[in-house]
Image (cartoon, rainbow, N blue to C red):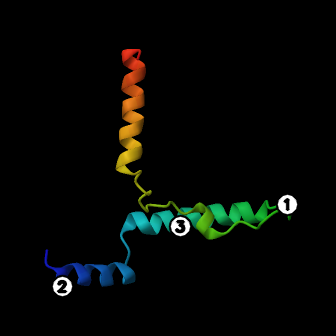
């Protein structure tokens, strides 16, 4: 797929998102309505974004912290 084709698909998905994205928004909307109807008035009112899945990638730990954790783990196993 070329960069141009990818850009075309991104534009197309803005107009007509894939079914799973549509269904996710529909489910979030229904959940938001139910939560809003049952909201007691205390605290923040629920927002639609509270019910949408977050597919963003979490920040990866640094290489040093992973090495330190692994060394600690294996030192515990070895009994040192």
Q: Is mark 3 on a helix, strand or loop?
A: helix
Of mark 3 and mark 1, the one earlier in the sequence is: 3
Secondary structure category for the residue under label 2: helix
Q: Where is residue 50 in the image (x, y as percent from the top left)?
A: 62, 63
C-alpha separation, residue under disc 2 versus residue under disc 1? 50 Å
Disc 3 and disc 2 in contact, CB within 8 angstroms: no
Q: Is residue 37 left or right of residue 56?
A: right
**Which residue is at the far top?**
79
Residue 71 image position (x, y, % from top left): 37, 31
Q: Which one is nearer the viewer's eye here, 28 or 70?
A: 70
Q: How crowded is mark 3: few (under 14 residues within 10 Å), some or many (20 or more)?
A: few
Label 1 secondary element: loop
Which residue of the protein is positioned furthest toward the front in this rendering? 80
Residue at the location (43% across, 62% down)? 56
Q: Which residue is drawn at 40% across and 63% down?
A: 20
Instruction: For the N terminus, give its image quadrant.
Output: bottom left
Q: What separation in Å lies between label 3 and label 1 (alpha carbons)?
A: 24 Å
Residue 58: x %, y % from top left: 44, 56
Left or right: 69, with 29 as reference point: left
Mark 3 vs mark 1: in front: 1
Q: Classify the position of the C terminus by image quarter.
A: top left
Q: Which mark is residue 26?
A: 3
Is there a contact, CB below 8 Å, between mark 3 and mark 1? Answer: no
Q: Mark 2 points at which residue?
A: 4
Callout 2: few (<14), some (14-19), or many (20+) C-alpha neighbours within 10 Å? few
Towards the viewer: 43 or 63:
63
First in sequence: mark 3 vs mark 2: 2
Q: Mark 1 points at which residue?
A: 40
Residue at image location 41% in from the left, 59% down from the top:
57
Q: Which of marks 2 and 1 is nearer the N terminus?
A: 2
């Amino acid at each position: 797929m070329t960069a141009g084709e990818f850009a075309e698909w991104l534009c197309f998905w803005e107009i007509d998102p894939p079914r799973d994205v549509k269904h996710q928004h529909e489910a979030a909307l229904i959940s938001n309505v139910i939560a809003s109807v049952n909201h007691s008035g205390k605290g923040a009112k629920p927002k639609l974004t509270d019910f949408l899945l977050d597919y963003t990638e979490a920040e990866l730990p640094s290489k040093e912290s992973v090495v330190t954790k692994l060394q600690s783990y294996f030192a515990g196993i070895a009994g040192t």
